[in-house]
Amino acid sequence: MPDTGDNFVPPLIASRFASHSESSVLPLHLAQHKQEVQHHRQKSLLNTTSNIELGHLPSTTDRGPNPEDFELNDDFSDWSEHSEDVPLVEGATSRSQMRRSTKKQKSNKSLKNLSIETGHQNGHLNGHAEGNGNMIEHRKKHVPGENEVKDAYLARQDFSLDNDPPTITPATPHMVEISFSDLPRQDKRNFLLLCLLYFLQGIPMGLAAGSVPFLLKKYLSYGQIGVFSLAIYPYSLKLLWSPIVDAVWSQRFGRRKSWITPIQTISGLSMIYLGGRIDHMMEAAGNSGDSGVWSFTGWWFLLVFLCATQDIAVDGWAISLLSIQNISYASTAQTVGLTAGSFLSHTVFLALQAPEFPNAWFRTIPQDYGLVTLGGYMKFWGYIYLVVTLGLAILKKEEKTRERDSIAEVYRSMWAVLKLKNIITICIIHLIAKLGFVTNEAVTNLKLLDKGFGQANMALVVLIDFPFEIGLGYYAGQWSTKYTPLRLWCWAFVARLIAAVFAQFTIMIYPVAVGEAVPLWYMITVIVEHVYSTFMSTIMFVAVSAFHARIADPAIGGTYMTLLATVSNLGGTFPKFFILKFVDMFTSATCNPPTTAELAKLTLADGITPVTSAFSCALEAEKHRCIDGGGTCVMHRDGYYITNIVFVIIGAITFWLYIEKKALALQALPLRAWRVASGEQGGYARVVG
């Protein structure tokens, strides 16, 4: 044995992949090995897919091969043949490490080296590690290091380079199917709490996205309602501030309660304030022109912003509230809560607010008002917000944690994902894909109300559509697996364009004048059109969500999924403002004044001036002034028809010239095309290969 002054380190670990030859021995000091394992855990060097060098033990000075040095289709036997060129890890040179190594030798004299031998066919895309022999000898009392875990993973028969190599993490409990009745008592309570929190989010969201635009129709033009559509933008842009919600919080009060409690308090107070003034604000929005609309929109923008921020905090809390084996109930709570809240504020509220529904079912003497008003409804739920928030602050204890996410790191990972060429392509697809049918979704129901269809009838249509949407969504999930997500998405895209044309045809054949009862055959036609359009929308949503889940990089899965969902939502949100403006722009209507004989018979309300000359009544305010003054508003050109047809044509052209080809090409890409890899300095780079 050499002198102690030679800094000799005895071999304690032997690990090397070879093709068909005897395994080589790699000297590595145990203490240095532990340091390197800890170092690599922090750097997460194994989170790349395409830059794995089989049989290579990285060190602090050796970062492994560059991903540009080989293709995933290469045979890894070539790497084995040149294994001698791989530099060995240098041993520790300090005397303290030498003394620790000597002690370890004395206590581990009987330990054997570890050697792994695999076949040479591992390395092709989607190939499997089918080695000629897997010989693993573990030393007694030896805890596997990171490299041994990597070697064992690569030797598995189900290994594929389309999957990310594992990091050293605690074992995940097995996911099992368990009914709600069999959940632990704590999980049941937390599940119901999540349902309640998501339900509260759905209340103002159902109003902002559903009921309020219907109620504004008698005050505002289509273009002004387009301005109000900006109020729901925060839900499509919450990714921009979600890292702040995850990183800034009070350790004393709790990571999630630090945000949920104040946000819900402000939301409740805002709803109480708006509830007391909402009727006056809606009238002022119509009478004050664009300035009143922007002021009214600002209040709802604030309310939706609060809901979106609460959603970020609740989403994060859901992961820790439920046991890991029952974590799937988090998405169930979100679906149940948000759907129930939105359904109550949209469908049920519209039915109860319209006088026709209670007059037909609850009253013996008809009245000209409904069972509930928008102001009373908002104030009621504002107080419920405050009561729930007080109970949450006092009764619910949050688990203490010292973990803090890095805001800069999350933003860096978002930027790294956005720079991927394929992500840029799918973002472009998301931003232009809904142009063809956004007119149908934003204007058709408003046009039905304009024709005289009535709020009660519209609420009935949505009520009938709701179970179809839920039930048919189940089959959409099955089809996305059977036919591949984006292929199914493309089929639904074409069907959704047809639905937009069908919707326009439904408006064109409206059979009766304003105020007359809608015949049964037309009611059935509207229901069929609505169910068909909603079903195609559900298929596209389920299919693209399945594709997002497939391509998301697990290393930054939350950021990846949220980014894609945000862009997809934005593609359906931002065009509404312009679409509704175009409807007003292309509409042409003239108010004809009453004749002298008709004017003599008119009985006008106080403050109303009779119409004496013709003027344009294309906008809602001018239309009301015309009718109130005894005039007749004659439509020459309906901007809805022009806008819908133009954008259906745009949607068809962009689909067949760009969207379909690109979508199917993205579907065929391997998973490595969607990955980003951690760099040496903590940054991110595209995985190539």
Image (spheres, rainbow, N blue to C red):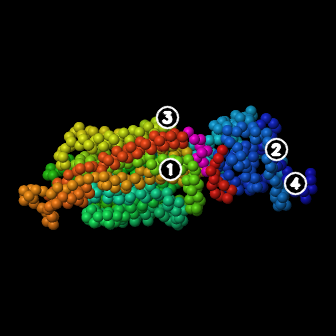
Q: Are marks 2 and 4 in contact (CB under 8 Å)?
A: no
Q: Is residue 639 above or below residue 76?
A: below
Question: Can you tell which of label 2 and label 4 is closer to the viewer?
Answer: 2
Q: Could you tell me which residue is drawn at 46 percent across and 50 percent down?
A: 431
Q: Is residue 518 magenta?
A: no
Indicate which disc, 1 or 4, sits on the residue closer to the N terminus.
4
What amino acid does circle 3 point to? Answer: Lys
Identify residue for label 3: 482
Question: Can you tell which of label 1 and label 4 is closer to the viewer?
Answer: 1
Q: Is residue 433 above or below residue 203?
A: above
Query: What's the magenta region?
Result: 668-676
Q: Could you tell me which residue is drawn at 75 percent across and 53 percent down?
A: 62
Q: Residues within 10 Å of mark 1 (few under 14, many from 20)?
A: many
What amino acid does circle 4 point to? Answer: Phe
Q: Is residue 325 left or right of residue 150?
A: left
What amino acid does circle 1 point to? Answer: Cys
Identify residue for label 1: 427
Q: Is there any visible trace of residue 540 in the rendered image?
A: no
Q: Name the disc covering residue 8, or none.
A: 4
Q: Residues within 10 Å of mark 2 (few under 14, many from 20)?
A: few
Callout 4: helix, strand or loop?
loop
Residue 673 at what x, y percent from top left?
A: 60, 45
Identify residue for label 2: 84
Residue 153 at what x, y percent from top left?
A: 68, 42
Q: Are marks 4 and 3 in contact (CB under 8 Å)?
A: no
